[in-house]
Image: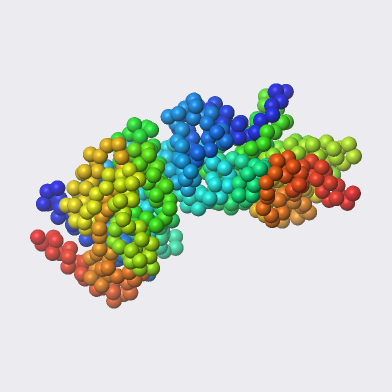
């Protein structure tokens, strides 16, 4: 990507982070940590990679994105709003009664959401079904699915991975947001899904390990995944949970908690500063 | 009158899928290593490119079906009822029913007539699990002709459908030449004014035998076949209660949450009438030949006859 493109994506990632904080603060609940860690991934996918059109969200030939770690939806919603699927103001009604934006993604009610997710492990199976449909119909679309590292403790992830490897779904690319923390503590202490790379290799995947907060790394890995033939891809993206908001970074307590008014101001102040620095460059 | 055939409804299902394949090019069939038993192997043989064996991983199978449906396919995801509706219940709820995807979940070897495999494989709860899900259509056809028509109706209906299949061969009693399957409509198989027996699935043929035996004793019992447990035909049930007073329900399922409860719920709200439920009474099954088990658990014509007489105070 060019320098200008990269700057645009950095700006998009920062705006997505602002959307996450605005949404979760307005909802007084939700999951900021794992949405912030994935901001570069959302930005890259929606503003560089995915062949999608907000004016035609159900286009049969579009690329698909399944947020298997559905709780990170404040990040997805911010990306979709920024892309033009719905007005930004919807973020401020997140989780409110009667609002479009549900606590976990709802494909029936939210344009741009390709699959209803939230119950961990299930999105990966649906992504496999979408990739298989593409193969059966000879369509050229690609399917991306973002998982949490804690989510890898769900058995269904491995049922789906075995399926993807067996059916050689090379149009499927999983991305693991490897931020190292889950609700009860560090992933290594709670459930121990490591070694993640070895597991996916054993299930027949092309495996890459990257810095998931680096747009250069994301680009390189996505471009490589597109060249892989005969097997599915997984990108294990090492990220910082809570990235961009100093007091949330690497803090397990910010997995599923909303900032209070004071914390909200601090977070927005930090993100606005990051944004203005980016725009001034 | 069409030819009488003795077939298990799982076989009729396999035949129906194969016959519908050309008319519905979006149909794909998924199984979880039970294709020979569920009879999806018939489809696999003729349309191997549209058959997906998911291996022994039913939860993933339902999720894959959801993804296929989200891309315009009509997946028939098939396994034993125990696993399709039981093990993968949460996938059916969250990945199929909640997004209202066009997936057909097919549970074979339902009920106690699985026989020798025993309690772990005898699903007596699938109707209850599926009928509580918003938007789920629940079908439990009773013979060969009805099953074939039901599979077609499921393919034509947009949205999630659960179809219950049996292992045991059943003598057909519907007339294949003029049989009409209307989703959500019960069928009055025998008119009657003394009492109404409402049966579903495998139990309809047993109930028919019971009604014939009762007739010889001078009891004029009405028989209603409910192939669609959800949405249930409220009118036919209310009319029966008004005209015959008492109701007996018969199902090869737990008496908790199945046909009997569905019928009772309609009557509680609309026209309170006594309902006697025949089914499995809050118990697990066990191993044994299917017919012996059905008799032991009271799922046979003689027990239906006895219960009906008792309900009439005879």
* Residue B130 percent across, percent down from the top left: 58, 49
Q: Is residue B184 left or right of residue A190?
A: right
On the rendered image, what quadrant is the N terminus of chain B found in?
top right
Callout count = 0
* Residue B265 percent across, percent down from the top left: 68, 54
Does the rendering let one see residue B27?
yes
* Residue A206 percent across, percent down from the top left: 27, 44
Q: Residue at x 54, y 28 (%)?
A: B42
Does the rendering let one see residue A31?
no
Residue B272 falls in which quadrant of the image? bottom right
Q: Is residue B288 left or right of residue A187?
A: right
Q: Is residue B180 left or right of residue B243?
A: left
Q: Is residue A16 left or right of residue B180?
A: left
Compared to residue A194, the image places residue B12 above or below, namely above
Q: Residue at x 61, y 46 (%)?
A: B121
* Residue B226 percent across, percent down from the top left: 68, 41
Q: Name the residue nearer the viewer: B20 or A16.
A: B20
Compared to residue B251, the image places residue B281 above or below, namely below
Q: Residue at x 54, y 26 (%)?
A: B19
Q: Residue at x 43, y 43 (%)?
A: B64
Compared to residue B46, the image places residue B232 above or below, namely below
């Amino acid at each position: 990507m060019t320098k200008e493109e990269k700057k645009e994506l950095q700006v998009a990632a920062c705006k997505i982070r602002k959307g996450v904080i605005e949404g979760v603060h307005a909802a007084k609940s939700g999951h900021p940590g794992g949405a912030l860690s994935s901001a570069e991934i959302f930005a890259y996918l929606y503003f560089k990679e995915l062949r999608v059109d907000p004016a035609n969200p159900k286009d049969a030939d579009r690329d698909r994105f399944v947020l298997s770690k559905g709780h990170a939806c404040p990040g997805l919603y911010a990306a979709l709003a920024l892309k033009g699927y719905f007005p930004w103001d919807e973020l401020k009604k997140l989780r409110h009664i009667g609002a479009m934006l549900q606590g976990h993604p709802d494909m029936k009610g939210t344009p741009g959401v390709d699959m209803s997710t939230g119950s961990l492990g299930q999105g990966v199976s649906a992504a496999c079904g979408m990739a298989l449909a593409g193969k059966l119909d000879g369509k050229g679309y690609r399917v991306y699915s973002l998982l949490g590292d804690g989510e890898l403790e769900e058995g269904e992830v491995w049922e789906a991975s075995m399926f993807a490897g067996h059916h050689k779904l090379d149009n499927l690319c999983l991305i693991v947001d490897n931020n190292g923390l889950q609700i009860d503590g560090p992933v290594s202490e709670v459930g121990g899904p490591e070694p993640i790379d070895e597991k996916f290799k054993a299930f027949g995947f092309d495996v890459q390990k990257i810095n998931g907060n680096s747009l250069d790394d994301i680009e390189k890995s996505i471009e490589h995944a597109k060249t892989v033939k005969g097997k599915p891809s997984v990108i294990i993206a090492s990220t910082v949970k809570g990235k961009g908001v100093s007091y949330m970074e690497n803090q397990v307590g910010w997995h599923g908690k909303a900032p209070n008014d004071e914390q909200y101001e601090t977070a927005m102040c930090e993100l606005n500063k990051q944004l203005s620095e980016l725009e001034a460059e | 009158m069409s030819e009488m055939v003795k077939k298990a409804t799982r076989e009729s299902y396999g035949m129906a899928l194969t016959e519908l394949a050309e008319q519905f090019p979006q149909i794909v069939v998924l199984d979880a290593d039970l294709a020979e038993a569920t009879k999806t192997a018939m489809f696999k043989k003729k349309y191997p490119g549209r058959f997906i064996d998911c291996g022994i991983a039913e939860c993933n199978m339902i999720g894959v079906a959801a993804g296929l449906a989200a891309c315009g396919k009509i997946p028939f995801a098939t396994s034993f009822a125990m696993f399709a509706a039981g093990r993968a219940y949460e996938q059916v709820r969250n990945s199929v029913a909640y997004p209202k995807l066009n997936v057909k979940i097919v549970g074979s070897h339902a009920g106690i007539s699985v026989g020798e495999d025993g309690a772990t494989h005898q699903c007596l709860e699938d109707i209850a699990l599926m009928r509580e899900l918003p938007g789920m259509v629940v079908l439990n056809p009773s013979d060969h002709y009805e099953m074939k028509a039901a599979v077609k109706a499921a393919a034509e209906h947009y949205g999630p459908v659960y179809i219950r299949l049996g292992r045991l061969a059943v003598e057909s009693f519907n007339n294949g030449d003029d049989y009409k399957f209307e989703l959500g409509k019960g069928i009055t198989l025998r008119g009657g004014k003394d009492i109404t027996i409402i049966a579903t699935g495998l139990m309809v043929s047993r109930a028919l035998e019971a009604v014939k035996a009762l007739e010889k004793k001078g009891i004029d019992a009405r028989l209603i076949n409910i192939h669609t447990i959800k949405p249930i035909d409220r009118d036919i049930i209310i009319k029966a209660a008004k005209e015959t007073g008492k109701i007996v329900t018969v199902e090869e399922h737990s008496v908790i949450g199945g046909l009997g409860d569905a019928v009772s719920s309609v009557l509680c709200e609309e026209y309170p009438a006594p309902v006697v439920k025949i089914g499995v009474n809050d118990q697990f099954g066990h191993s044994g030949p299917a017919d012996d088990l059905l008799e032991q658990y009271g799922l046979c014509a003689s027990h239906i006859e006895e219960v009906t007489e008792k309900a009439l105070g005879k």
